[in-house]
Amino acid sequence: DAGVTQSPTHLIKTRGQQVTLRCSPKSGHDTVSWYQQALGQGPQFIFQYYEEEERQRGNFPDRFSGHQFPNYSSELNVNALLLGDSALYLCASSIPGLTNEQFFGPGTRLTVL
Amino acid sequence: QKEVEQNSGPLSVPEGAIASLNCTYSDRGSQSFFWYRQYSGKSPELIMSIYSNGDKEDGRFTAQLNKASQYVSLLIRDSQPSDSATYLCAVNPSGGSYIPTFGRGTSLIVHP
């Protein structure tokens, strides 16, 4: 049973550049959520995609955008990168419902120089 | 602002002892509660879910939920050095949101 996968593992960018991160959900899951985790902090919710639409969004600027494809995989795009965007970006998949257990991928470590 | 609070630690316990990790939350209507383990440089791994008041046991782990007092705890029996990690508490808020709120995590160190 394939778990959540993310690519790339690590990424180094410079300020002002754009980045795209990718995620494939756990088999059988149709919902993908993206989180940003800074060092020493808990994951902060960016947005969630379900049925190819953004269902809910956290307190992140419009520089952060996303997409979900018909096969439930998802992308996170960040434009005009800032130094403060350096973090671990986590994708989690789930089946919404009473339990709503979320399963995380290995993450993408983004460094902005 | 719905909040989840955890003591950042570190909590240091000797090998073989019971580690007790605590979490409080502000949203009284919350229904689902989760504990994740996160090793340094890795992603969070779900280790326990609890939905009803009382205790839920899974191997060496026991989750305890008290909705009246708005706290959830995780006990780790017979702690091992391999349990050394950050433990994140996550709470699903009321109101139909499917997005859990995470605490900052408690760092646990189990020393031989």
Image: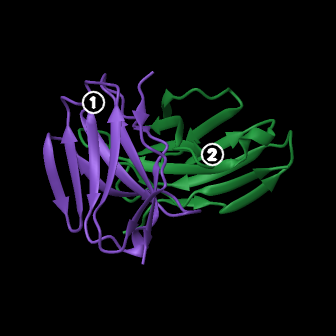
Chain colours: A green, B purple
Q: Is residue A103 visible in this depiction of the protein?
A: yes
Residue type of the residue flagged with mark 2: Ala
Q: Based on the displayed image, in which of its 4 quarters is residue B103 positioned?
A: top left
Where residue B84 sits: x, y (%)? 45, 67
**Residue under pointer 2:** A38
Horizontally, residue A38 falls left or right of residue B21, namely: right
Residue at position x 44%, y 40% from top? B102
Quadrant holding the C terminus of chain B: bottom left
Task: Examine the rendered structure and indicate whether residue B16 appears above or below residue A43.
Answer: below
**Residue under pointer 1:** B30
Task: Examine the rendered structure and indicate whether residue A22 appears above or below residue B76.
Answer: above
Quadrant holding the N terminus of chain B: top left
User: How many numbered dots are placed on residues in this image?
Assistant: 2
Residue at position x 62%, y 29% from top? A60
Horizontally, residue B46 falls left or right of residue B54, namely: right
Residue type of the residue flagged with mark 1: Ser
Horizontally, residue A6 falls left or right of residue A101, namely: right
Q: Chain of mark 2?
A: A
Where residue A105 sits: x, y (%)? 50, 58
Residue B58, labelled with which disc? none
Callout 2 secondary element? loop
Q: Based on the displayed image, in which of its 4 quarters is residue A8 positioned?
A: bottom right
Q: Which one is nearer the viewer's eye here, A51 or B108?
A: B108
Q: Chain of mark 1?
A: B
Callout 1 secondary element? loop
Q: Based on the displayed image, in which of its 4 quarters is residue B24 positioned?
A: top left
Q: Which one is nearer the viewer's eye here, B48 or A106?
A: B48
Q: Dot 1, crowdedness within 10 Å: few (<14), some or many (≥20)?
A: some
Q: Is residue A52 visible in this depiction of the protein?
A: no
Q: CA distance from mark 2 to mark 1?
A: 25 Å
Q: Which one is nearer the viewer's eye here, B76 or A101?
A: B76
